[in-house]
């Protein structure tokens, strides 16, 4: 059996995806939620369109919103709903196309899935994603690994003292095989 370099194309199936670009050392954002490290990084052709057409709603957190209030996924033509989960919606800077939620994460997912209308909900928050993972509410973890080592920032998953979370891979071949990669520093 041949191993493919990428998972099968994403489908709009009402899934809850924990979806991020991530540095090789596990950071989804640099210090202070910076994303400047992503400049010059490119994905495979058609990747943004693939996810943009399958995403019906985004669930994110207040920390990211406060740093990037105008950030919307994909292109300006994306028509999905954006939900920001926060303990303090009353002091959030309002935006026309943002819905602020102050509820349990499971309820936030239910609201986002209803709004996604059969498409996927993308969770774009490390803290919210970890809470949903612990409750068994994440269907897939979709990562696009950038060839950069940040060394500091916001980790995808922080669980000191917790048990390992076992995963299977969405590729042809053994879904539990170690993924071997080899890189050289750019000089």
Image: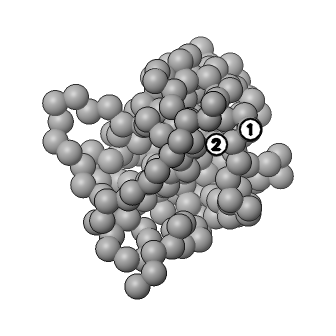
Instruction: Look at the image and tell me in which quarter the C terminus lies.
Output: top right
Where residue 185 sits: x, y (%)?
55, 36
Q: State left or right for residue 123 relative to residue 91.
A: left
Q: State left or right for residue 168 relative to residue 172.
A: left
Q: Residue at x 66, y 48 (%)?
A: 81
Q: Is residue 74 visible?
A: yes
Q: CA distance from mark 1 to mark 2?
A: 26 Å
Q: Residue at x 42, y 31 (%)?
A: 155
Q: State left or right for residue 143 relative to residue 74.
A: left
Q: Is 94 rendered above or below residue 128?
A: above
| SS under mark 1 | loop
Question: First in sequence: mark 1 or mark 2?
Answer: 1
| SS under mark 2 | strand
Q: State left or right for residue 123 relative to residue 75.
A: left
Q: Is 180 rendered above or below residue 129?
A: below
Say which of 117 and 16 sits in front.
16
- Residue located farthest toward the right when viewing the structure as drawn: 77
Instruction: Look at the image and tell me in which quarter the N terminus lies.
Output: bottom left
Label of residue 40 in the image: 1
Residue at label 2?
82
């Amino acid at each position: 059996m041949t191993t493919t370099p990428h998972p099968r194309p994403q489908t709009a199936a009402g899934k809850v995806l924990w979806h991020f670009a991530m540095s090789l050392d596990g950071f989804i954002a640099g210090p202070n939620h910076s994303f400047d490290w992503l400049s010059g990084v490119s994905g495979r052709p058609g990747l943004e369109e693939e996810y943009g057409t399958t995403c019906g709603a985004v669930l994110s957190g207040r920390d990211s919103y406060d740093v990037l209030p105008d950030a919307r996924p994909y292109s300006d033509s994306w028509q999905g709903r954006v939900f920001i989960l926060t303990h303090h919606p009353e002091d959030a800077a309002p935006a026309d196309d943002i819905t602020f939620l102050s509820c349990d994460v499971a309820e936030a997912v239910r609201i986002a899935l209803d709004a996604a209308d059969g498409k996927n909900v993308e969770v774009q928050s490390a803290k919210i994603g970890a809470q949903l993972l612990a409750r068994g509410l994440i269907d897939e973890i979709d990562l696009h690994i950038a060839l950069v080592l940040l060394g500091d920032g916001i980790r995808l998953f922080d669980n000191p003292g917790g048990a390992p979370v076992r995963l299977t891979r969405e590729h042809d071949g053994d879904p539990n095989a170690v993924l071997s990669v080899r890189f050289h520093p750019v000089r």
